[in-house]
């Protein structure tokens, strides 16, 4: 099949997917450049294994190459579709090794907070709070930690999370509500602005 040339880096995802479906390897390369790091980071968070994360990333883009013609942009964003494929592959690989997926929250709280506050005393208080929030996140059940991570660190909507993890939307909302109630307890009980004498 003849493939049209002259595709640009700024082309819309749906246009690029149609080009991939027509056999355009350049369109696939552009999509890999656009989403490869996100897919890899998500796979690494699930597997905690760079080799498995690479394999998941490769499989996600092979799946896109093979199934681009069946992708429906009306049903999901391409990033959501890629993350769902990645998650499924990660689960498959981990199960084969007798492990289960994890979603560690390896976030540099200190670096981000140093940029957000000016006064040293405020920075210390904010870092302390960040540490408490990180501890609370780590103590959440896996299912709740997963939805919080996908929402706040990967920027997915509730419906996108439901598609990625293969759960009903109501289940996602319920897990999110329970997780946020627990995290809110950490923040609400911490005196962010003590009275100064």
Image: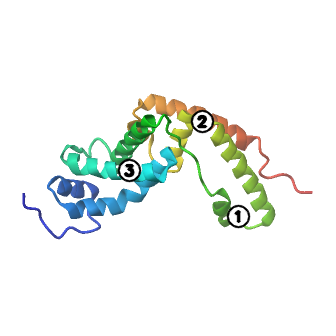
Q: Which mark is residue 179?
A: 2
Q: Nearer the viewer, residue 51 or 187?
A: 51
Position of residue 153 in the picture relative to residue 30 (left or right): right
Q: Secondary structure at mark 3?
A: helix
Point 50% across, 36% down: residue: 99
Q: Nearer the viewer, residue 87 or 96?
A: 96
Point 12% across, 65% down: residue: 4
| Rendering coords of residue 27 (x, y %) | 23, 61
Position of residue 184 in the picture relative to residue 160 (left or right): right
Q: Quadrant of the C terminus?
A: bottom right
Q: Secondary structure at mark 1?
A: loop
| Rendering coords of residue 100 (x, y %) | 50, 36
Q: Nearer the viewer, residue 76 or 137?
A: 137
Q: Nearer the viewer, mark 2 or mark 3?
A: 3
Give the crowd class for mark 1: few <14, some 14-19, many >=20 residues within 10 Å: few
Q: Which residue is mark 1?
A: 117
> Which tag, 3 or 1, sits closer to the chain's start?
3
**Mark 2–mark 1 distance (CA, rounded to whole Å):** 26 Å
Mark 1 and mark 2 in contact (Cβ < 8 Å)?
no
Give the crowd class for mark 2: few <14, some 14-19, many >=20 residues within 10 Å: many
Point 76% across, 41% down: residue: 189
Q: Which residue is mark 3?
A: 55
Whether residue 188 is visible, yes or no, is yes
């Amino acid at each position: 099949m003849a493939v049209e040339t002259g595709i640009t880096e700024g082309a819309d995802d749906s246009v690029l997917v149609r080009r991939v479906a027509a056999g355009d390897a350049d369109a696939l390369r552009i999509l890999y450049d656009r989403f490869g790091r996100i897919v890899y980071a998500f796979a690494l968070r699930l597997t905690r294994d760079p080799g498995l994360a690479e394999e998941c990333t490769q499989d996600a883009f092979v799946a896109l190459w093979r199934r681009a013609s069946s992708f429906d942009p009306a049903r999901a964003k391409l990033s959501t579709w890629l993350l769902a494929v990645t998650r499924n592959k990660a689960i498959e690989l981990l199960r084969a090794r007798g492990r289960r997926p994890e979603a560690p929250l390896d976030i540099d709280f200190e670096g981000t907070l140093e940029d957000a506050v000016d006064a040293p005393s405020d920075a210390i208080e904010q870092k302390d709070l960040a540490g408490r929030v990180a501890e609370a996140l780590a103590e959440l059940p896996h299912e709740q930690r997963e939805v919080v991570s996908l929402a706040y660190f990967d920027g997915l909507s509730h419906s996108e999370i439901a598609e990625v993890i293969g759960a009903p939307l109501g289940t996602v909302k319920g897990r999110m509500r329970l997780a946020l109630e627990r995290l809110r307890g950490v923040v609400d009980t911490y005196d962010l602005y003590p009275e100064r004498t």
